[in-house]
Image (tube, grey):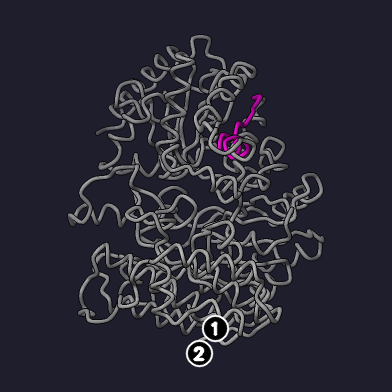
Amino acid sequence: MDVELISNANDDLARLADDALLSVFPERSIEKVLLVIPPDADERLFNLDTAKRGRYYNYPGYGAGVIAAHLRAIGIEVSIFNLNNLVLRAAQETEEGSFDFRAAWRTPLSDCIRDFAPDLVGVSCMFTQTHNSTVAVLNELRTIFPTLPITLGGVHVTNCLSSQNTSKTMLSDFGAANFLFTHEAESAFVRFVEVVNQERPCSELIQVHFNTFDDKLSFTNRGAAMEGEELDRLPALDLMNLDELSSHGTIGSFYCLVDPGTRFATVLSNRGCRARCTFCSVRSFNGKGVRTRSVQSVIDELLRLRHDYGVGHVMWLDDDFLYGRKRSIELFNEMVRQDVGITWDCTNGVIAASCTEDVISAAAASGCLGLNLGMESGNPKILREVHKPGTVENFLAAAEVLRKYPQINARVFLMLGFPGETYRMILDTIQVSQQMNLDWYNVTILQPLPGTPIFMSMVEQGLLDSVGFEEIRYNSGAYGKHRKSAELNRDMLARDFKDAFSQVDLDRIPSGEELDDIWAYMNFHLNFRRLFDENRPIKMKQQLAYLRNIADLVSPDNAFAQYFSGVLEHRILGATGPAVISRLEKYLNESPYWQQRFDEFGLRTDQLVSGDFPA
């Protein structure tokens, strides 16, 4: 197509967009924007008891905070309404049996819109498990406010629109949203507001799909990724409920290692990831490479969090936090020099090759309490096929460094169920994990997410037939499939998994049900049984805090967590508390599944009294 035809096509698209915007914004004016964060999951997945235990995640709306800051910079009045926090707060304040999930957010949302009177509402959908919850919020908004302009963006939106297998379902489910934004959308959203306000021409729209109009009315061109001063702009912290989030839920995976009552927050120091793992959507959302904020802008944010909002611990949101050895060390050294006084963790994980002696030493000095190491597999063939930026040698070297800093609780991400992965390959992962000898192994089963390379590859190979968003959930976490077994309403570790690797052809690919047995086998042997050999005081203290968290908050029906917390109590205090023993005895008497597991592995409650534990 020659230049003139391209120009004419762009002019036609701009005219169509201008007409469409006029139909949604008759006055062509946006002065006030409300940003809405839906509940993390829908009513079907929500459990009141879990919410009352404070187990559900309750993250600040960091992305909404960043967009709000950019909108404020062009003179727009902004408010953020976090429905997830609202639901969790209501759940903790409600009497048992009388909680109405939908009422907890519907009426307050309607009241907020009537009081604030926004010209535009922006809704975010970050995770696949939030799909149905977001649909409910959009439909409620459209029912009560038929002419209210609504936009939608986030990682899940980008993933689904980039896959032919999910885009039609996505557009249908989210039909109540007038406009859909893809990828990092701060610049795109600001441009959109300026176009509506006739401060820019429609031809400058980027990354936006006009959802309720002609299917061809999309501006798919991506804008220049934010860098420099734009990337350094601090989020609108005053709009993010930082004073109450950690009172109603959790943030990250290491909260049990922090003193009770500590206020939590999140910080993003860079965007993107150097890796190109086929099961990850970071690159498709953020683009290639990594863009870093200035070290001082990050320090400024940390100091504001501490002094203005009383935050004592932060979780880094970065997908490649230790990117750039020199910058990482500079950041950690400045945290010490400028007396930030905040502890931190990296729940999202770090790349093993970055865990060098000088980096981890500086991290420990700056307040690192915990981090996750992204390993996934210990089999070289699987690592190559999923484009993992690491080798077995990298993992072992990183583990050797991390073991020198016992104050850092070092955990490892493992994943099962890759296409073509055999029993023998999984045994490689177990063996490497045992050699690493780190603190905990978070084992999940592969859940291909729309838009990721592995998802599209598995569709092409016929390994995935269709996508139902209600079935796409994380395998771990408070909303995960492995919180409880749907079949028998019992913890997954209560499965009969002792013979998971016996009497099988090791070169065979395990079935889905067999993967559940392998998951349970790895969880027990890599995490629980090895605690019999733990004798380092600082590690026993960390593990006891973590196991108490599992037994009391995360999974009260996990008898292994109850038993091994008793083991560690005996090692640290010289005796196991009678309440722990009584609780475990009661649970085992009521659960033949768990009693059978204990019999199989030679575990008894009287061992918690005598201290005579299996070798």
Residue 358 seen = no
- The spot of residue 244 in percent (x, y) is 70, 42
> Is residue 34 shown above or below 503?
above
Residue 462 seen = yes
- Is 456 magenta? The answer is no
Magenta region, residue range: 76-90
Quarter assignment of residue 210: top left
- Residue type at the position of mark 1: Phe
| Residue of label 2 | 615
Front residue of this view, candidates 201 and 407: 407
- The spot of residue 15 in percent (x, y) is 38, 17
Front residue of this view, candidates 580 and 102: 580
- Residue 357: numbered disc: none
Residue at the far left: name it.
462
Please say if the residues under marks 2 and 1 sit with CB atoms less than 8 Å apart.
yes
| Residue of label 1 | 532
> Is residue 216 shown above or below 27?
below
| Secondary structure category for the residue under label 2 | loop
